[in-house]
Image (spheres, helix red, strand yellow):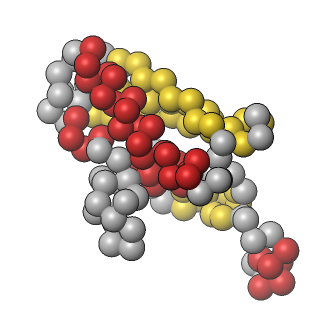
Amino acid sequence: MPISARAENPGMDSRLDPSTGDYDRTRIADLSNAIYLRLTTPLGTYWADKTLGSKFHLLKRAKDLPRIKKLAQQYAQEALQPLIDTKRADKIDVVVEWAHDGHLRVYGQVYQYDVLLTPFSHFVKVS
């Protein structure tokens, strides 16, 4: 993309494919990359920002208990809170369900000005 075209669309990013973690050739202007990185990066492991990430890695050995589902919801909300703090989003709804196959499904929606910006879905491996 020429520099002039990039300057016209400063909010356009290459999309990270959640199934592979690699960039695909899709251009996006939503928060899907920010959501993906905040949910999949273990908290404190990203060199440029120690506050980026989630605590989902702490659930790898968790059992199928109701409190683990609640804990996963709390971890997702904590990971996505910076999007609200920086005014990139106004509201984030998070729902967690047991897939009962060794995964929790975390999904929800990100809103700004009462308009749905980005729906998201993420699986967290548990025992």
124 sits to left or right of 5: left
Residue 17 in sight: no
- Residue 74 image-quadrant placement: top left
Q: Quadrant of the C terminus?
A: top left
Residue at 49% in and 45% down: 80
Q: Position of residue 57 (x, y in %)?
A: 25, 44
Residue at 35% in and 38% down: 75
92 sits to left or right of 52: right
Q: Is residue 67 above or below residue 36?
A: above
Q: Quadrant of the N terminus?
A: bottom right
Q: Is residue 9 above or below residue 123?
A: below
The residue nearer to you, when weighing 48 against 121, is: 48
The residue nearer to you, when weighing 50 against 121, is: 50
Q: Position of residue 46 (x, y in %)?
A: 34, 66
Q: Position of residue 99 (x, y in %)?
A: 36, 19
Q: Position of residue 31 (x, y in %)?
A: 62, 51
The single residue placed furthest to the left in the displayed view is 61
Residue 68 in sight: yes
21 sits to left or right of 5: left
The single residue placed furthest to the bottom in the displayed view is 3
User: How many numbered badges does the structure rendering display?
Assistant: 0
84 sits to left or right of 48: right
Residue at 41% in and 38% down: 76
Residue at 37% in and 60% down: 51
